[in-house]
Amino acid sequence: MSTDSEAFSTVPQEYYPNYKITGKREKTLDILENIEAAVKVGTGIANSTFGELHNLFSDVFPYFPQSPANNVIYKQCLLTTQDLA
């Protein structure tokens, strides 16, 4: 049976929380929740919201796990939010 410290030692470094982006990550999640809520009730979303989201994506994506599949998703998010802004 492994201890907690042994379990953590097998987690790749890229999955550890990064304290440098905690605030921006939380703000990103908050905006995404607000967008989802607005879409579900049919409320409009300000273009500036997508501009803010685009800027946050630009800051946090480099800290997320990097793989070809992930990078395509990141680029799609950046392009979409840029167009909507």
Image (tube, rainbow, N blue to C red):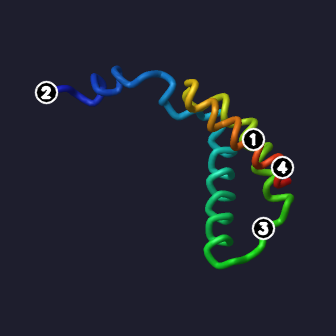
> Residue 64 location in percent, x, y?
59, 32
Query: Quick one: 21 or 55, which is closer to the camera?
Result: 55
- Between the C-alphas of marks 3 and 1, the distance is 17 Å
Q: Earlier in the sequence, mark 3 or mark 1?
A: 3
Question: Mark 2 — residue?
Answer: 1
Q: CA distance from mark 1 to mark 4?
A: 9 Å
Task: Check disc 4 and report its element: helix, strand or loop.
Answer: helix
Depth check, front residue: 82 or 52: 82
As displayed, is residue 83 above or below residue 62?
below
Of marks 4 and 2, the one in the foreground: 4
Residue type at mark 3 is Ile
Disc 2 versus disc 1: nearer the observer: 1
> Residue 45: x percent and y percent?
78, 67
- The mark that comes first in sequence, 2 or 1, is 2
**Residue 71 shown left or right of residue 43 in the figure:** left
Query: Mark 3 packing: few (<14 Cα in 10 Å), some, or many (20+)?
Result: some
Q: Secondary structure at mark 3?
A: loop
Q: CA distance from mark 4 to mark 2?
A: 51 Å
Amino acid at dot 2: Met
Query: Pointers 2 and 1 in contact (CB under 8 A)?
Result: no
User: Which of the pair 53/13 is nearer the observer?
Assistant: 53
| Neighbourhood count class around disc 4 (C-alpha, 10 Å): few under 14, some 14–19, many 20 upward | few
Q: At x 35% / y 20%, what residue is drawn?
A: 9
Q: Pinpoint residue 39: horizontal percent, then vertical percent.
A: 66, 70
Indicate which disc residue 78 carries. Answer: 1
Q: Quadrant of residue 79?
A: top right
Q: Which residue is mark 4?
A: 83
Disc 1: CA contacts within 10 A as few (<14), some (14-19) or many (>=20): many
Q: Which residue is mark 3?
A: 45
